[in-house]
Image (cartoon, rainbow, N blue to C red):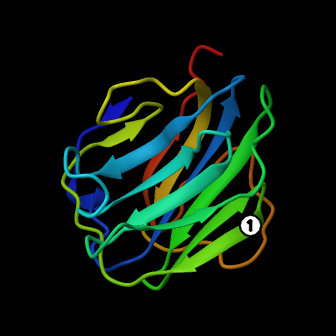
Amino acid sequence: LIVPDHASLQFGAGELTAELWVIPMPGATGPLLSKRNVGSGFGAAGFELFLDDLGRPGFRVDTGAGEGVIAAADLPLPEGVFSHLAGTWDGASVRLFVQGVLVDAASTTGGISCSEPLVVGMDPITGAVTDVVVDELRLNGVAMYGTNFAPSTVLSVGPDTVLLLHLDEGA
């Protein structure tokens, strides 16, 4: 799924929450949700929720000032069942929540300036599809979570929601 760039998807020096419900298939790795400058690597600004080569989730934010900052889990997501992931950025800290539990945080400063589309379930550079099922997906223009929380199984629109996708049509 590719969502064209739009002014509401420009987070600049503001805040961001990217969250989704995902079912990883056996051996799944790669981007789950990505908005980054294609062809210039991470040094050119963007953000991404992903599964690393061992199936561990991470949230990467690059403000264009370096190699990017990653908040990452130590353990892989369970295969074949839904997991909730949320990545937040408040302009100073990048946080990753798994099932509503804060698993990692890292510091960064600057802004995100990226005019590329938002890509769900595939690598925006190689086009390789990530072997996952994504159900609910929401982007908010604020860092919604700073501490542990109970994730909602059905995400809803709030005052700072810039994108909400219920990807369960036909289910």
User: Outermost residue toward the top?
Assistant: 170
Front one among 165 and 32: 32
Q: Position of residue 6 (x, y in %)?
A: 22, 52
On screen, residue 75 above or below 150: above
Which quadrant of the rendered structure holds the N terminus? Answer: top left
Q: Position of residue 32 (x, y in %)?
A: 51, 40
Q: Position of residue 53 (x, y in %)?
A: 60, 39
Q: Residues within 10 Å of mark 1 (few under 14, many from 20)?
A: some
Residue at position x 58%, y 34% in the image = 29
Please count the marks in the image: 1
Q: Is residue 1 left or right of residue 100?
A: left
Q: Position of residue 94 (x, y in %)?
A: 53, 73
Residue at position x 62%, y 26% in the image = 133
Helix, strand or loop at label 1? It is strand
Residue under pointer 1: 103
Which quadrant of the rendered structure holds the C terminus? Answer: top right
